[in-house]
């Protein structure tokens, strides 16, 4: 990964105010003849203005669903989402359009996310038309050219169609479309994982540059920590519909507090031969349990190498470990919601 | 190694060949059709019929109802190439003039079915749920009746005549368009680009008309061509049993009915209008098949299963 590590110089102005806050957010998908799939099940999350928050977890942990829920592209079953202090979970049709102007999305697969029948110009102009920006043909055309230039595409791409473009070029179009509404927050749903490795760094650098130039805030969803640790100010780790650890990137990757984060980190090769030789991989046993029937107590306990007595009985809360570093693990004190009487007796601090 | 080097489609070259559904633009489509010789011939036949329908009376050597009592039931000759009927009217002239009502009824009827069916199928497939259930069950009810029986029933309610024949045939073919459209909409609505359109704030109407409809156009175009064949056949059938175009206006179906009584003595009365129907219907069918191949071979089974109706 040749992406530039964040240097203090281009880091955003220190911990900003909270731009987006999710509280107890849940998205359950009903299943015919069975319990609902709890794709997202009680997530608390804060995204601060100007930062990049990396959201990491393996396939099926609900991270993409969480991203979709933030734009109300899937409806939350429970919980609250606040954008700048305004609850967006109950917006009407009109205000919803406003939300989707302030929060944009870049999708994983640039082959599927562009309408094959439309020209690049029409794709990028669509948010302008929907939100009534740059009214008039000439103004809109000028703005489209400007947006294409911002993502490093020649204005001549305006009249081409998606199938004429490479994967990297298509993803640039996806970014230009996301920028068109002048959003404050962009949810990047694995924006580079379906691109060639040689193209990944280019698109990543583009996103970093745009953030610096436009003061954007990113929620950067990815399935491996390595992809996000270079661009993220903070990282949130997700497992089976829950956030299990969140904190500054350096803290989370340097001193992981949750066994799942440790396992994820141990899978990342170290670009330093002596260190790589002593690296011990923590290989998790078993499969991810079904999100329709998650384990009682801590959801990770069935695969956790450190599981002990309270894990099946107490659902761990995200406890503060200092400096905004939070983890949901009983190794740092048994805190949370007891699921049965045995659990209630095991709490460190019975309320 | 040389054998390998000769293989025509390396990955690089394969990448340059536009996928079938990407070659669509009207011009590319026409080019693809003309490459198919059968389709090219069918298009020529259809073009001739359209010209005949437009010029009609001006091409006909005799008037539409010009009666010559001396020339009843004459066999084909230089003077009357298709012979004359029991009233001494020139069959060639009536076949030429009859092209216009036949094609017009077919076109308008399919137009009605196309608009109604596509709108219903689009709304049902896009919204799913209760709307889908109600609309599609209604379509199923219409679909359950044999086509001609349903058309006769509609005409029984609305009365005979060419206009009502258009409406009746339109109603009969609406369910096919609704089904073909809905089936395609169901797959397109799940595409990421639809979700992407929603993510930038686009509303349902915009998504349906700008993103979904253009991406379901191919099977609908094919269905239109095939339905035109059936609609012209249906118009002929309705006229044959006296419900469609009313005498003395010339109509192929009507002429066939008149000729039926004289088939032993004057075969030309029935054969020439019959051949005209045959040529137009066959041409629309061949064109429809070719369009289907050119637009999207993958759609073949979907259309066939939805359109299995004579």
Image (spheres, coloured by chain):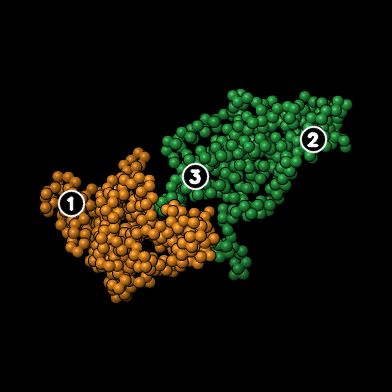
Mark 3 vs mark 2: tell me if same chain: yes
Query: Which quadrant does the N terminus of chain B fall into?
Result: bottom right
Q: Which mark is residue A336?
A: 1
- Which structural element holds mark 2? helix
> Callout 2 environment at 10 Å: few (<14), some (14 to 19), or many (20+)?
many
Residue that mark 2 sits on: B93
Where B148 sits versus A234, above or below?
A: above
Q: Position of residue A281 (x, y in %)?
A: 29, 65
Image coords of residue B223 (percent x, y): 59, 42
Marked residue chain, label 3: B
Mark 1: secondary structure: strand
Indicate the position of residue B166 as horizontal and vertical percent values.
63, 33
Camera-nearest label, 1 or 3: 3
Secondary structure of residue under mark 3: helix
Query: Do the residues indicated by labels 1 and 3 lie within the same chain of the protein?
Result: no
Write the residue at 24% across / 62% down: A247
Asked where in the image residue A225 lies, by quadrant, the reply is bottom left
Q: Residue at 23% x, 48% y: name it.
A: A296
In the image, is B310 to the left or to the right of A75?
right
Chain B, which colour? green
> Quick one: A347 or A306, which is closer to the camera?
A347
Horizontal arrangement in the rendering, residue A191 relative to residue A286 (left or right): right
Colour of chain A in the rendered structure image: orange
Determine the CA span between mark 3 and mark 2: 46 Å
Q: Nearer the viewer, mark 2 or mark 1?
A: 2
Question: Which residue lies under the disc numbered 3?
Answer: B185
């Amino acid at each position: 990964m040749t992406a530039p590590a964040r240097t203090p110089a281009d880091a955003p102005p220190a911990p900003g105010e909270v731009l987006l806050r999710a509280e107890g957010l849940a998205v359950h998908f009903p299943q015919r003849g069975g319990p609902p799939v709890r794709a997202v099940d009680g997530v608390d999350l804060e995204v601060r203005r100007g930062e990049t928050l990396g959201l990491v977890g393996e396939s099926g942990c609900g991270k993409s669903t969480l991203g979709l829920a933030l734009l109300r592209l899937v409806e939350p079953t429970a919980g609250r989402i606040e954008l700048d202090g305004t609850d967006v979970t109950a917006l009407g049709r009109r205000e919803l359009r406003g939300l989707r102007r302030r929060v944009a999305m870049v999708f994983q697969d640039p082959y599927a996310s562009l309408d094959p029948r439309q020209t690049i110009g029409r794709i990028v102009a669509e948010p302008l038309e929907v939100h009534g920006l740059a009214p008039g043909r000439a103004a809109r055309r000028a703005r489209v050219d400007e947006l294409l230039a911002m993502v490093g595409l020649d204005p001549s791409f305006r009249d081409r169609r998606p199938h004429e473009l490479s994967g990297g070029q298509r993803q640039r179009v996806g970014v230009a479309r996301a920028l068109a509404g002048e959003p404050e927050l962009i949810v990047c749903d694995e924006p580079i994982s379906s691109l060639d490795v040689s193209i990944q760094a280019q698109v990543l650098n583009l996103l970093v540059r745009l953030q610096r130039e436009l003061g954007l805030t990113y929620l950067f969803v990815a399935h491996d920590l390595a992809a996000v640790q270079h661009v993220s100010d903070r990282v949130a780790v997700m497992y089976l519909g829950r956030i299990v650890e969140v904190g500054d990137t350096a803290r989370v990757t340097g001193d992981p507090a949750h066994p799942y984060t440790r396992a994820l980190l141990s899978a990342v090769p170290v670009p330093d031969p002596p260190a790589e030789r002593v690296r011990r991989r923590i290989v998790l046993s078993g499969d991810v349990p079904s999100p329709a029937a998650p384990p009682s107590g801590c959801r990770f306990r069935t695969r956790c190498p450190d599981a002990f007595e309270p894990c099946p009985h107490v659902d761990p809360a995200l406890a503060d470990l200092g400096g905004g570093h939070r983890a949901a693990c009983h190794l740092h004190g048994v805190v949370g919601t007891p699921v049965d009487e045995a659990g209630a007796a095991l709490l460190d601090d019975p309320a | 190694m040389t054998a390998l080097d000769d293989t025509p489609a390396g990955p690089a070259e394969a990448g340059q060949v536009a996928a079938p559904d990407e070659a669509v633009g009207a011009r590319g489509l026409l080019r693809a059709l003309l490459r198919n010789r059968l389709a090219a011939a069918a298009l020529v036949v259809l073009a001739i019929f359209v010209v005949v329908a437009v010029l009609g009376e001006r091409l006909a050597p005799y008037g539409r109802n010009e009666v010559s009592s001396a020339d009843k039931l004459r066999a084909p000759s230089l003077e009357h190439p298709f012979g004359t009927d029991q009233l001494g009217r020139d069959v060639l002239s009536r076949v030429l003039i009859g092209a216009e009502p036949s094609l017009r009824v077919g076109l308008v009827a399919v137009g009605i079915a196309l608009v109604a069916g596509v709108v219903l199928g689009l709304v049902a497939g896009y919204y799913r749920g209760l709307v889908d259930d109600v609309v599609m069950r209604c379509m199923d009810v219409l679909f359950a009746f044999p086509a001609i029986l349903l058309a006769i029933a509609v005409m029984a309610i609305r009365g005979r005549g060419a206009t009502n024949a258009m409406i009746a045939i339109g109603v009969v073919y609406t369910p096919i368009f609704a089904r073909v459209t809905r089936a395609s909409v169901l797959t397109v609505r799940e595409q990421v680009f639809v979700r992407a359109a929603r993510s930038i704030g686009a509303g349902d109407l915009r998504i349906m008309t700008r993103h979904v409809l253009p991406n379901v156009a191919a099977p609908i175009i094919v269905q239109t061509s095939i339905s035109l064949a059936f609609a012209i056949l249906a118009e002929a059938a309705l006229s044959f049993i006296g419900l469609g175009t009313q005498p003395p206006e010339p109509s192929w179906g009507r002429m066939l009915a008149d000729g039926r009584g004289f088939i032993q003595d004057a075969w030309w009365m029935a054969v020439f209008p019959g051949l005209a129907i045959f040529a137009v219907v066959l041409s629309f069918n061949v064109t429809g098949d070719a369009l289907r191949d050119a637009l999207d071979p993958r759609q073949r089974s979907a259309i066939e299963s939805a359109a299995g109706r004579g």
